Amino acid sequence: MRLLLENVTKAFGDVLAVDNISCALDGGQIAGLVGPNGAGKTTLLNIIANFVRSDSGRVTLEGDPLPPGLAAYVPEFPDLFPVLTVWEHFKFIATAHGISQWEPKVLEYMDKFNIGGKKDAFAGDLSRGTKQKLAIGICLLREPEILLLDEPFSNLDPASVRELRNQIETSKSPGRIILISSHNLESIQHLCSRVLIMNQGKLVRNQKIDAILEEMRNKGYRSLEDLFLEVTENAGG
Ligand code: ATP
């Protein structure tokens, strides 16, 4: 399966948030979308999720336009219902989407991701990390072909980042494309096989992680951050 973006452009007034972006993402892949604040990452995810309409260009999956709802999107601050419990969230999504036999799947999921103890906790009382895990969990219940995660690691402590990274890693599947926007370059390096770098609306890099890491080493940089800063400063204008 292949998600294709062709010449996708979106402006907000004078600001070209997404500037003629073209790229392809393949099933089984976790891709990282990085870029400085205001680069256009969230706008691009919103276009793929069908929340924002691009001014021009096309987004297709296997050649067909993406119908609304096909891509599952987890925003930086997930919209959970504060007075529903963790279990009730899964029940709500299963009912809304007509998913049968969901209970064993959810029990297994909660066990695997260490949120079984929070089954009856209200979402409003959960830590940020557990909220993220729940938000991703309810998306996965729909078995989405495209999973979009916007800043999943922001404001998480190192242990929660690691747990969430494991969760995302295990969500990888040949029939699924995962695209993660993040400023956490270490997590991107760990998780992603491809990295897209945006700056001022433009896609300034689209490379396999191995190629990026090789370039990083060849340039004597110690971290992906050094290369990221070079790329975004040079392209910044
Ligand atoms: P960050 O890393 O800070 O979340 P980002 O890379 O996700 O940034 P976007 O949120 O996509 O960037 O914003 C790209 C540009 O588009 C910014 O200049 C932003 O101010 C502008 N923008 C985004 N959404 C809107 C909107 N609804 N109305 C007006 N301008 C917008």
Image (cartoon, rainbow, N blue to C red):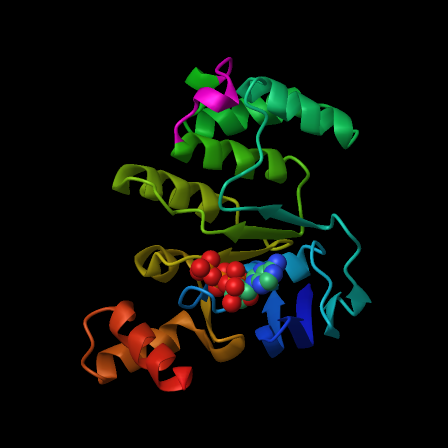
Q: Quadrant of the N terminus?
A: bottom right
Residue 116 in percent (x, y) is at: 46, 20
The residue located at (60%, 27%) in the rendering is 105
Query: Where is 158 relative to 216, above or below?
Result: above
Residue at the image point whose x is 40% and y is 41% from the top: 164
Q: Is residue 59 above or below residue 68?
A: below
Q: Is residue 150 a member of the stretch shown in magenta?
A: no
Extreme residue toward the top, this view: 120
Rendered position, 13 above or below 84:
below
In the rendered image, residue 232, in percent from the top left (x then y), is placed at 37, 78
- State which quadrant residue 161 falls in: top left
Q: Looking at this view, is 180 or 25 the one in front? A: 180
Q: How many marks?
A: 0
Q: Position of residue 215 (x, y in %)?
A: 30, 81
Quadrant assignment, res 21: bottom right
Question: What span is in magenta?
Answer: 119-127
Q: Is residue 118 above or below residue 212?
A: above
8 vs 28, left or right, is: right
Residue at the extreme front of the image, as rendered:
13
Q: Is residue 30 visible?
A: no
On screen, residue 221 versus residue 170, left or right, reads left
Q: Residue at x 64, y 71 (%)?
A: 13
* Visible residue check, residue 37: yes
Answer with the quarter of the image where residue 220 lies: bottom left
Q: Give the image location of residue 86, x and y in percent.
A: 54, 21
**Left or right for 17, reference 234:** right
Horizontally, residue 107 falls left or right of residue 92, namely left
Q: Main secondary structure of the magenta part?
A: loop
Quarter of the image where the C terminus is located: bottom left
